[in-house]
Each structure stands twice: as C-alpha cells, then as structure tokens.
Amino acid sequence: MALSDFILEHIDTILEEWATFATTLAPAKYKFDRVILLDHARHMLETIAADLALPETAFEQAQKSKGRGVQPSPAQPTAATEHGMARMQSGFSLIAAVSEYRALRASVTRLWERAPENHPMPPAGVVDLIRFNEAIDQALSESVTSYYYEKEQQTRVFDAILSSTPDLGFTFDLDGRFTYANKAFLELVGLPLHAVLEKSFQDLDFPHAAEKDRQVRFVIHSRQHARGEVRFTLPSGRDNVYEYIFVPVLDEDGAVEAVAGTSRDITDRKAEELRNWRQANFDPLTGLPNRCLFRDRLEHEVRHACRSGAPVALLFIDLDKFKDANDTYGHDAGDLLLQYAAARLRSCVRETDTVARLGGDEFTIIVQDLGGNGHVEHVARKILEQMEKPFHIKQHDIVISASIGVALAPGGADTPDRLMEQADHAMYASKQAGGNRFGFYSRALPPGP
C-alpha cells in the first residue's frame, strides 16, 4: 500500500495518537480540547497525502532535498502556515509548536513501519518515507515562518500602540535591566533604544535610581506590584512629576519571567490638586491659613499639649479701627490694609507658629514651644508695636491698633473649642478696655458679648 493511501486510511488513528502527545504541549493557562489541537493537523496530512500521490520530477526531488520546495503564497495560506499563526496566538512556545511536527512525523512513521505489508520495506515504501519527511520539513518551515511573522506582527502592533501613547512604557529582564522602552520614554531620557537596553536605572543616572532598581527587584522576588511617584527635570529645566507602576510578567507556571512598567506625566494633575488644596485651606486675600486649616492645626497642637504637658498658646487678634479705615479709604485700601497687617503678624512669630485669618479683620496665632508665659507676652507686645505703626496705603497713613486675647492649653483648656472660646473672651475684654492691649484669659474676666 502506498504511503499516501495508508495515511488517508489510518488518518483517525494517526491523529488520535498524535493528539495524546500534543495535549501535553498546550500552555497550562489554556484548556485545549482535542478538536482545537487537531484544527490543522488533519488538513495537513490530507495535503501531504495528496502530494505523495503525485509523480515527482527529478528537479523537484533535488529542490526538496535542499529545502527549496514550493513556498506558499501569502494570499493562499496552507494548513502549515495557519498552524504556526494559530499556535502563536494561542500562547504556544516555538519549541512546543515544532514538537508537534516531530510527534506527527513519529506517529505516521511508526504506524507505517508496523504495517504487515511493509515487512520487509519495499523500495517504493522507502521513497515514500523520504518524500513524507521532506513534506513534513516543508510544512515545518512554513509553520515556523508563519509563527515568526505573527510574533513580529504582534511586536510591531505592540510597539506602535506604546509609541503612540504619551505614557512611558518599558520592560525589564530578571536582572532588572531594560529590555524594551517606547518612544515616549526614549524622548524623556534623550537616548536611543540601543543605549537604554541592558541598562539599569542607575546606569542611566535616573532620579532616585537606587530606589527604582530596588522596586524592580522587589517585583521579581515577590510577584507583587510596586508603584510610586518621581520628579524628572526636563532639558528645558521644568520639573515634571510622573507616577509609575511595575508589574510582574508571569509564565505558564506562575514564575516571573519579566517586569513590565508604565509611567504617566501627572504634573498638571498635581498642580491642580495643589491649587484645590490651597483654595480649600488658605485665605485668597492674605495667603494665610484659613479657618479650616487653622482648626486642623489647632486640634493637632492641643492633642500634643494634653499628651506631652508642653503648653500651647492661642492668640485671638482683632484690628481696632479697621472698619473706620475701610469706610474712609475704600474697600481696595481695606484689602491692602489686611494684607499688610497679615505680613506684620507673620514677622512677629517663628516659622513653626501658625498665623491664620478667620475672616474680616480677625486673626489667630498658634504659638508652640512656649518655655513659659514670657514668650507669649513678648509676641503679644511685638504685635501691638507693629500694628501701631502707620500703614502707608494709597498716599495715606492709616493708623490702627489691635486687641489681643490669649488662652493656654492644657490647664485652662483641654479642647480646641474651649481654647478658642477662652481666647475670644480675652480678646473681647481687651477691646472693651479700650483696645491696643492684650490680656490672658481668666475666670475673673467680665462675660463676653
């Protein structure tokens, strides 16, 4: 029996034996059934059998022996080319795809040699086996070529996608060295791809390089994500902020085979967040902390004072005669007066103290690390001196003063609300006494308004 007829007559047996082996080659993350594994093998065997049934010229024999068989047209793919493409798309390794051909060759050869009519093997049978092996080699060549073409096409598509995005994209090997970087990353670092490949962050003198290399190693060893933010100075001198994430790339067995990373420019977002935070926490006129931020800091300081016993002082300040000045010289002059007064208040305290504007002409100051009431008195007297000096605004010398109330925690008050009530009470007493003075809260003070 000719080999071509033998293949067609026993094709189900051949494929059944072959599929048993091919199942072991399928990627573990996929559950392939036999129908999928046999998708192109039957067509391939039928094609080979048809080829074996045709007479072959001496020239064709010589060409095939040199691996120069007829190449398929890209417009008319063969079963072998479809096999290579499908295996690439299904996640088979090239070794696994090639092993399928070896198994197919072995299945046909083994069954053919075991056939009773082939003992001893007739000369025609030997020729058929040679032609069969050449056909398998031809199919293998077509499949590998298709596999590589599909892989390269996916790589080109992958690179085109990553190169068209403003986000930075890159990959690392298990030594923490770059194996890929997209166009956005290369433009950022100002280097060609070949100068980046096989380099680490430290090799590239990247900002906070040691920390980045450490995070890549962490991802490799832990199989967990790592993320963060980094500032990068552009050639223009502008500082941009990037958020990044490193993720593990796992193989079929769940082992890390690479690390993929992406990074995005969040400079505008961070600037917007900062603007929103400042609008929510700072007075737009004076630039001082507003009531919200003041309250947050006061709660922190009062908790610390109650816990440690180190006193903190709260000064309530109301500008005397501000309303008269505002009515006389106009609101624009009044706004300038508040701005200048805020600057003078800041000059009277340390950077660690908090000066805030509650609204109108009311200000507060949180003074920490007192070392006794003497420091608070010094600050209060300095404020009175500064507020007494004329403010030169729009060719006018505007004269005002300040009424100050002081309350201490702990001891006198152990909550922010209580401390604010006491300081406000003391400030009202100073104003009722004629203004331009300060006073500490005490239970002997007359009741407030």
Image: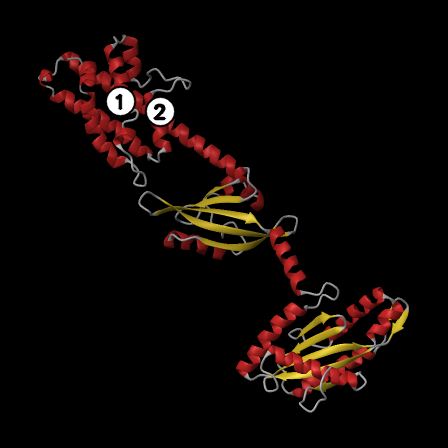
Tell which circle, 2 or 1, labels the residue nearer the N-terminal end. Answer: 1
Task: Give left or right: position of 444 versus 399.
Answer: left
Residue 446 vs residue 265, the one in the foreground: 446
Task: Give left or right: position of 292 versus 16.
Answer: right
- Tell me the CA gap for discs 2 and 1: 12 Å
* Badge 2 element: helix
Residue 142 appears anywhere in the view: no
Residue 139 rendering spot, x and y as whole percentages? 30, 22
**Which residue is disc 2 drawn over?**
82
Residue type, label 2: Glu
Report the label total. Answer: 2
Instruction: State the residue at coordinates (19%, 14%).
Output: 5
* Relative height, residue 318 to residue 179 (above, below): below
Which labelled disc corresponds to residue 338?
Answer: none
* Badge 1 element: helix
Q: Quadrant of residue 302?
A: bottom right
Instruction: State the residue at coordinates (63%, 58%).
Output: 274
Which labelled disc corresponds to residue 42?
Answer: 1
Residue 388 rendering spot, x and y as whole percentages? 82, 79
Q: Residues within 10 Å of mark 2 (few under 14, many from 20)?
A: some
